[in-house]
Image (cartoon, rainbow, N blue to C red):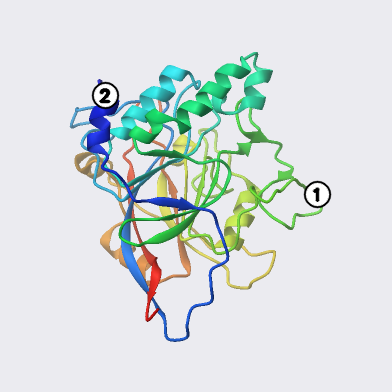
Amino acid sequence: MRYPTPQALARINTAATTTPTTTTAAATPKPTAEPTTRLVKFLVISDTHDLGLTDDTSSAFRLPTPSADVILHCGDLTNNGTHESLSKVLRMLGSMPAELKLVIAGNHDISLDPELYATQGGDAKDSAKALELMRGPLAQECGVTYLDEGTHTFTLRSGASFSVYASPYTPQYGSSAFQYPSGHDRFNVHTPAWATNVGTAASIIPDGIDIVMTHGPPQYVLDDTDDGRSAGCEHLRRAVARAKPRLHCFGHVHRGYGAGRIRFDERGSDDEELGPLQKEWVGVNQSRKKGFAALSPSSAEAFREDKSQGLMVNAAIMAGEGKPVNAPWLVELELETAERVGE
């Protein structure tokens, strides 16, 4: 399928005032100041693996995509990270309407991991060009922001402000990009005695983050494989239990596609756990008809009213035989604005 030229995309993607900022300590609000909120729509996808949007109305991944304020792509943009494949996915994202489009890499996007690419016999110049492409003029014209591992903050035109922790890393399995030994904990300050802490200022998930965006799932959360194993990361699970994000989105494990609400432990200790996952039923035919999946009205209301819950979303588009079987997830979050009433 042909996507618009960069010039056409520039017209599609109006000049955004969305501004990424570095995380800084917020000034103490005045006692009379009260937070105001905005409802923000997030369209979550992952594991598109070179797949493009189609005009076929029977496809779950098709044009037009639902309108959203923010698009989150959780990695495996391509099958092997070629320059052509990365350009294709940028143009695909450019055809999707949203004010802000945030993207991370996955284990298949090997050219975006210079260290791994070199071990596979790749040319360092090709890896540098791939990273330049993801941050260069075409990405800008398509409205795409490529996120390195770390914490990022954004403010939308509506004034809604939110923080995102991003990481492309997953536990070692075979030889692919952005992987770590299962005994290495990169997400926490405190680590069990049996594991090795390799956390850095960028890789540790901060408490109170609004959104966690990783390529892989936490252990036992939408991470079942075809052979019945749990492929998620134990250290990521502990980090998410501690940080308590309102939304954690990922992919990687195609069979785990789905979403569910989870209740966070409120003990405030290092051994905090995630409560049982209340998995959302997805009507396959209905989501294909609409072009997206979403929480049921009753589930959405419960999630909106209970701020002690977090929403877990595995948004892997590809499933089985390399086809785009699954629909994107449309998630609504109520977020505070950058300014407060009374200031």
The correct choice, above or below, for 300 with respect to 256 in the image is below
Q: Residue furthest right?
A: 193
Badge 2 crowding class, 10 Å Cα cut-off, few under 14, some 14 to 19, many 20 or more, is: some
Question: Do we see residue 133 in this rendering?
Answer: yes
Which residue corresponds to the image point at 51% horizontal and 34% vertical from the top-left? 105
The correct choice, above or below, for 253 with respect to 271 in the image is above
- Res 5 label: 2
Direction from residue 300 to residue 220 in the image, left or right: right
Quadrant showing the N terminus: top left
Three-letter amino acid code of the residue under disc 1: Trp
Q: How many marks?
A: 2
- Name the mark nearer the viewer: 1 or 2: 2
Question: Do we see residue 318 in this rendering?
Answer: no
Give how far across and how far down residue 246 sits, in percent: 46, 61
Label 2 secondary element: loop
Give how far across and how far down residue 181 sits, in percent: 71, 36
The answer to which quarter of the image holds residue 112 is top right
Give how far across and how far down residue 233 sits, in percent: 62, 45
